[in-house]
Amino acid sequence: MSILDSLRPKGDATEIPLVYVRDAVVFPHTIAPILAATKFCVAASDVAGKGDKKIFISLLKNLPADGANDIDVHEVGTVAHVLQAIRLADGSVRLLVEGQRRARLRRTVFRKEYLGAVVEELADDEAPGEDDKEFGALVQIVRRDFASYAELVKKVPNETLHGVQRSDDPHKLCDTVANAMGLKTERKQDLLAVIPLRKRLEATAQALSQDIEVLTIQRKISQKVRARMDKSQKDYFLQEQIKEINKELGREDDENEFAELLKRIESKAPPKDVLDKAAKEIGRLSKLQALSPEAGVIRGYCEWLADLPWSAKTVDSKDLDAAKRALDEDHYGMKKAKERILEFIAVRQLNDSLKGPILCLVGPPGTGKTSLGRSIAKALGRDFVRMSLGGVRDEAEIRGHRKTYVGALPGKMLQSMRKAGTSNPVFLLDEIDKMSSDFRGDPASALLEVLDPEQNSSFVDHYLELPYDLSGVMFVTTANSVHSIPYALLDRMEIIEIPGYSEYEKLEIAKHFIVPKQISENGLGGSGLRIRDDAVLEIVRHYTMESGVRSLEREIARVVRKIAEQAVAAGYADPKKPIADFKRTVTAASLQKLLGKRRHENDLVFSEPGPGLACGLAWTEMGGTVLPVEASGFEGEGELILTGNLGDVMKESARAALTYLRAHAHDYGLSPKSFSGRTLHIHVPEGAIPKDGPSAGITLAAAIASALTERPLAAGWAMTGEITLTGRILAIGGVKEKILAAHRNKITKVMLPEANRKDIDDIPSEVASEMQFRFCSTIADAFSELLPDAKPGAKRPAKRPVAKSPAAEPTKPAKAAPTV
């Protein structure tokens, strides 16, 4: 029956949390374990644990459909007391309960998180007196038959057997016997539902009689089978004697399976403790039946011991020139990363025992971090394996599962080592900043041992349970940002920045790598297809907006596919018409026919200066970007309004800038009324994108000063720098990315903190030669360039500028939140 359509309550009824089970019946007067597997049952057990620890347990008739609330359970169940509750790893709860009384379910009540059962407890009827001979005979039959049953099954605990024989309570006698018998769940439920004591005794006696009859027949059959097995064992003994005779005669097959397996493990030259473990496990395996489950587990374990590279190593390349050529063949630029690899090769020639470095390549997407790992392996002459950590939540992905679990395997670390086949590969841990943790463990913590040169010589996988030496491995990790990497893990790695590319670098990468690759892959190799530099630059500037070259490669591939389509349409797929005769030149002017209209314009940069307008520079995980700031003052109560989805740090920078200007108002022709009688509104466009960070301080100060003095800033300047209340400008990060962003947006003048002068050496010379840099250590120094004619009392109205591109632009893809 359906509980939602169940009976109306009769008599006194109480509400108790409902726990429904699939494969267990709990009798009164017994203690039994049950599993609360569903969210309703788990919640019910939690509610009971906080209250009087009472639950109503009922056997589930049918599984509910997905998403259905109609729970179909038996009407008669047991009111039980929760003795113990253990929460398991999958979220379910293992309960140890003591049955107390039978109860009839009247209806269910859906609470917020669990199901409540409105039940009417069923009182036990009184046992007849000693003068009822028939009832006394029933009790004796149950006791006698249960003793016979226990003798046959050999599984009934002595305490239970003695308790039944000594029990004076017929109710407890019936329930204890029914619980101890190995009946099917439905038969146990039938016994639970029998309320009158006499009928319950009769049903229990009948169940005992039936089971005893079946068990007696099974015993007879078992004796016959055992007699046949005795003959089989005799035959097996004779066969073994024949094998020994053949062995003495030299007829034994040399390809003994277990000896061969041990020989394979020995050939890998593992440590002594591994050999001892292998010999022990193979010895156990030789004593087991081939088809036993344990034999399969041990065989799989030994196969893993035989497959892992315990001592096999590749010889590192010692030719620095060849290594440099290998790195330059696949990647343009990346000076610091290449220098670090060449340093390692040089030092390795002087010290053979040098442990491999643990490098972390950090940079925007599409800058070649992952492919650089493969090039490092090529330069060193080592094998290469890659393991993606993006989305990894389970520690067992790193350390493996213990072999007691069904289907257990080693973690991905050892799986990758087996795939490499050597003990000193280049091991790339991709997207290390994308890991997360939950109740299954913290994979980042598991990597602490892997990436620690002092510990990874004895890495222990849960499946293997033996130390494995990872000290010869050269680990290379990649990340878009170090902010989400735990500090303890970050401290173990050597950070190498892979910054975004300038337009010139993208042009060179396209000319030497991308264009030849796409022409070859799209079947136009050997043709006269030529993509001019101006076409590549047009794609870089107006069809992509990235620090890397991934989108650039997609767009160039699209151009080449369009040309390939034209070649096929012109008949060059015919072998009689050689592709070498096909000629095409792609120019900037012809791109719109192939790729459509331009997708990106520099619409964030103000077309002309105006009061309250300043251009800042910001850094995101995708690279650098411009950060326009608008400020406007009007009559009010001296409030400061901040809009544009700004973070706390950026808001504090705005307040610090305003405080500085209040303190130095006279220097810029401002009076106290300029502040107290005016409300100042600061807005940073693209409000859907969150923005935060300290380096917008000078930009905010310049915009506020321009708005209050009603004078535009000097034209063409972009700026970045953190400010203090005393007017100092502090150093910031991401200088290269910010300058490249300014260059992309045709900004040629950049104002930087004096402390960042050293970072200009990292700027590509072709970019630096087109830029004008001004280094400032104070706000006053910056304003001498930005507001050169700001004098006490001087004001000059100016018109607001209009952005370069029209307002009706197509929707742009979401950007990463900038850190300014």
Image (spheres, rainbow, N blue to C red):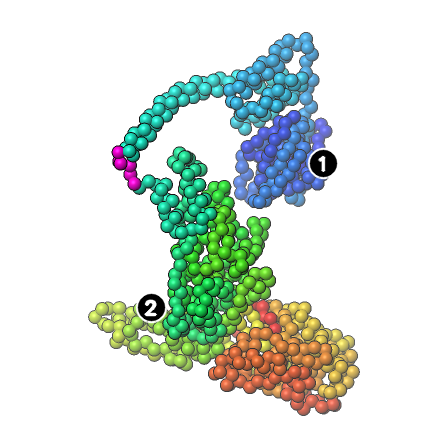
Residue 610 visible in image: no
Q: Is residue 399 above or below residue 650?
A: above
Quadrant that contains the C terminus: bottom right
Q: Tell me which numbered mark, 1 or 2, is placed earlier along the sequence.
A: 1
Relative to 366, is 587 on the left or the right?
Answer: left
Relative to 540, is 675 on the left or the right?
Answer: right
The disc placed on residue 522 is 2
Residue at the spot 54% in from the left edge and 25% down from the top edge: 155
Measuring from the top left, give residue 562's x and y in whole percent. 36, 71
Residue at the spot 57% in from the left edge and 14% down from the top edge: 144
Q: Nearer the viewer, residue 537 or 240?
A: 240
Residue 471 visible in image: yes
Q: Nearer the viewer, residue 57 or 354?
A: 354
The disc placed on residue 405 is none
Judged from the image, the secondary structure of the residue bearing numbered disc 2 is: loop
Residue at the spot 61% in from the left edge and 11% down from the top edge: 137
Identified by mark 1, the residue type is: Asp
Q: For residue 529: magenta?
A: no
Judged from the image, the secondary structure of the residue bearing numbered disc 1 is: loop
The residue carrying mark 1 is 52
Identified by mark 2, the residue type is: Asn
Judged by its main secondary structure, the magenta piece is loop
Residue at the spot 57% in from the left edge and 85% down from the top edge: 773
Q: Name, please, the residue furthest toward the left.
A: 576
Quadrant that contains the N terminus: top right
Q: Is residue 100 above or below residue 698?
A: above
Measuring from the top left, give residue 639's x and y in whole percent. 74, 74
Q: CA distance from mark 1 to mark 2?
A: 73 Å
Span highlighted in magenta in the image: 249-254
Q: Quadrant of residue 293?
A: top left
Measuring from the top left, give residue 57's x and y in whole percent. 62, 33
